[in-house]
Image (cartoon, grey):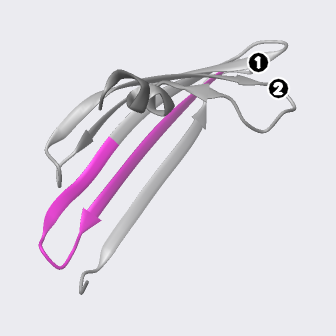
Amino acid sequence: IKSTIGNFNMLYDLSRKYTLNLSQSFNFSERRNQDSSFGVLRRFDRFVLSFSAYYDAVEDVSGLRFGIIPTGLGFGLASDQLRGAFGE
């Protein structure tokens, strides 16, 4: 694959409990967008709740994701992990 792709990701703490996440990938070789996403993280005492929306320009798909990440474990459960269980 001969392409030059640039990625930009920004995390911004809105408060102690809320973080905004913006992400963008651009293919400079083809001069077009690869994918875009934005999301919000909400911190609780024992877990983090995530919600995001995305658009994949390569596959022309978009959707919503959500996840629950227990504090201290380093992994959690997200909606994109469940795709196989529902036939996608």
**Above or below — where is 79 with respect to 33?**
above
- Picture quadrant of residue 54: top left
Position in image of residue 67 (x %, y %): 56, 23
Position in image of residue 84 (x %, y %): 40, 32
**Above or below — where is 13 with respect to 24?**
above
- Picture quadrant of residue 55: top left
Q: Residue furthest bottom?
A: 2
Residue drawn where x is 19% and y is 57% of the image: 33
Residue at mark 2 = 71
Residue drawn where x is 21% and y is 75% of the image: 28
**Front-lying residue, 53 or 70:** 70
Give the SS element for disc 2. Answer: loop
Q: Are marks 2 and 1 in contact (CB under 8 Å)?
A: yes
Q: Which residues are magenta?
A: 18-36
- Picture quadrant of residue 2: bottom left
Left or right: 58 in relation to 54? left
What's the mark number on residue 47? Answer: 1
Left or right: 13 in relation to 9? right
* Mark 1 neighbour density, 10 Å: few (under 14) some (14–19) many (20 or more): some
- Sequence-earlier tag: 2 or 1: 1
Q: Is residue 9 magenta?
A: no
User: Looking at numbered disc 2 in the image, what kind of residue is underneath it?
Assistant: Thr
User: Looking at numbered disc 1 in the image, what kind of residue is underneath it?
Assistant: Phe
* Mark 2 neighbour density, 10 Å: few (under 14) some (14–19) many (20 or more): some
Magenta stretch, main secondary structure class: strand
